[in-house]
Amino acid sequence: MTKLSHYDDEGRISMVDVSAKDVTVRRAVAAGKLLVNLETLEAIRNKATPKGDPLEIARIAGIMAAKRTSELIPLCHQIALSKVNVTAEIVEDGIALTAEAVTSSQTGVEMEALTAVSVAALTIYDMLKAVQRDITITDIQLVEKSGGKSDYRAG
């Protein structure tokens, strides 16, 4: 059986030691979606939502969340982020979110990108729940990562 990375030799939970890894530029992109009705999309387009512009507030919330990932996810390394960008755009059946995180570090930024897109989605939900209660948050996923041992791109 493969050794599990977050357990020490005695089987206790531990943070992975990345001190021997090379510092490389690492990048991750995550995506997600909110399914909302046409009336809600029109309210966003017309800037008629009660709490302000949910897309712009979500962008800022996602960036802030990426910077706090190590405080939210147990055993996640605290890393210096070189760049975080979150986009939120209206699409046919809702709102598409994308988060990109970049660092020069010994460990990747997948969790930062996923945290950013997740918190951005939750922020939009919070800002629109007075307009529509049955919003669905869906399809949160890692889209791609580069740097480190291996690269990844969703299929």
Image: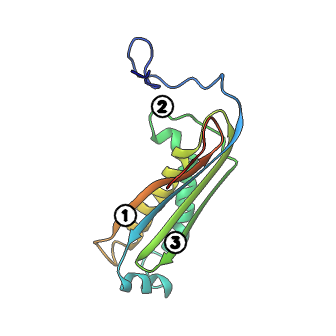
Residue closest to the eye, 43 or 144: 144
Instruction: Name the spot of residue 136 as percent of width and height, x first.
Output: 33, 67
Instruction: Name the spot of residue 133 as percent of width and height, x first.
Output: 28, 72
Q: CA distance from mark 3 to mark 2?
A: 30 Å
What amino acid does circle 3 point to?
A: Leu
Left or right of 144: which side holds 74? left
Residue closest to the eye, 152 or 138: 152
CA neighbours of label 3 inside 10 A, class few (<14), some (14 to 19), many (20+): many
Q: Considering only vertical position in the picture, is 69 above or below 34?
A: above
Residue closest to the eye, 48 or 122: 122
What amino acid does circle 1 point to?
A: Ile
Q: Earlier in the sequence, mark 2 or mark 1?
A: 2
Instruction: Name the spot of residue 12 as percent of width and height, x first.
Output: 39, 18
Q: Considering only vertical position in the picture, is 132 above or below 124?
A: below
Kindly report which numbered mark, 1 or 3, lies closer to the viewer in this rendering.
1
Which color scheme did the rendering employ for the protein? rainbow
Q: Residue at x 34, y 78 (%)?
A: 131
* Quadrant hosting residue 103: top right
Q: Earlier in the sequence, mark 3 or mark 2?
A: 3
The reply to whether the C-beta atoms of the residues labelled 3 and 2 are less than 8 Å apart is no
Numbered mark located on residue 137 in the image? 1
Q: Secondary structure at mark 1?
A: strand
Q: Secondary structure at mark 3?
A: helix
Q: Earlier in the sequence, mark 1 or mark 3?
A: 3
Q: Secondary structure at mark 2?
A: loop
Q: Which residue is mark 2?
A: 75
Q: CA distance from mark 1 to mark 3?
A: 14 Å
Q: Which residue is mark 3?
A: 55
